[in-house]
Amino acid sequence: FEGQDIPICMCVDFQYGYQRKILQEYPEISYVISGESEGAWLQILERLDHDQSMESCPNLTSRDSVNKDEEAGIPIYDFPKNLDTLAWADKEDIIRKKQKHSLLYASRGCIHSCNFCMTQNIKNPRRERDILDVVQEMENNYKKYGIIGYHFTDSVLFDSSPHSMNRLATFVTELQSRKLSLLYTANFCPAFVLQVSPDVLDKLLQTGLYSVLIGIESGNRQDLELYNKHS
């Protein structure tokens, strides 16, 4: 790209704090796009296409704004309120790399507020996709791309609340009825594993769950209280 006037955008998970520093230390970067930026990208591309100002563009910190204002660098933050309005992620790179596994999410944010975790600062409030849409995406990826394995990136895929247990039941029923031979891993909190029945865990195993990540953090109650981790 040498000699070409091509703006470089850097995407970061965090909402606040480092945008100005990044732009100061890396002069080749024109913009920093923060947090969940799907909703902002359409505005960004539209403004670039029409040579319009990036001022007040959500989730965006520009080099021009930082250069003009010493206090600049904190963008107007926005995030998708309804995850079902977002398109499924394109998986063409899976075919190109000859892979059979991928990442997937059924929710963003977390029901917990552990004070050592960055999720509450970059992904909250918690929002959920329609679980039917999640299964439909899994089936589409299986038929179109041959993807047979997933890691769910959700902070907690399911919890023991009645609402979540209903989602789990629908998830299991739909996967079984579609006869998809899939494997997946997921994150759970310790309370879920302790509170649900063995039958529930068996149903998840039958649909392809083969590995569970559990954040125990500590066996010391005082430490857990310090972390604000109610397990």
Image (cartoon, rainbow, N blue to C red):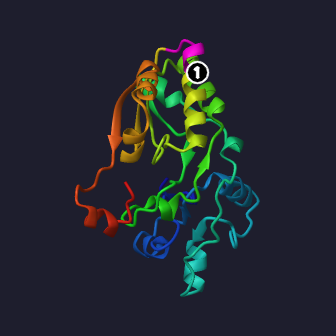
Residue behind mark 1: 173
Q: Which residue is situated farthest in the top direction here?
A: 179
Residue 119 visible in the current orientation: yes
Above or below residue 3? Residue 77 is below
Q: At x 44% / y 36%, what residue is drawn?
A: 196
In-front residue for pair 23/109: 109
> In screen coordinates, is 218 left or right of 129?
left
In-front residue for pair 58/177: 177
Residue 189 visible in the current orientation: no
- Is label 1 in a helix, a strand or a loop? helix
Residue range (magenta): 175-180
Q: At x 53% / y 57%, what residue is drawn?
A: 123
Q: On the image, which quarter does residue 118 sit in?
A: bottom left
Q: At x 66% / y 38%, what residue is drawn?
A: 87
Expressed as whole percent of the image width and height from the top left, the position of residue 99 reads 41, 24
Above or below residue 189? Residue 56 is below
Q: At x 49% / y 53%, what residue is drawn?
A: 1
Expressed as whole percent of the image width and height from the top left, the position of residue 42 reads 71, 53
In-front residue for pair 133/216: 216
Q: Which residue is situated farthest in the bottom direction here?
A: 70
Name the amino acid, label 1: Thr
In-front residue for pair 75/1: 75
Above or below residue 202? Residue 21 is below
Which quarter of the rendering shows the C terminus?
bottom left
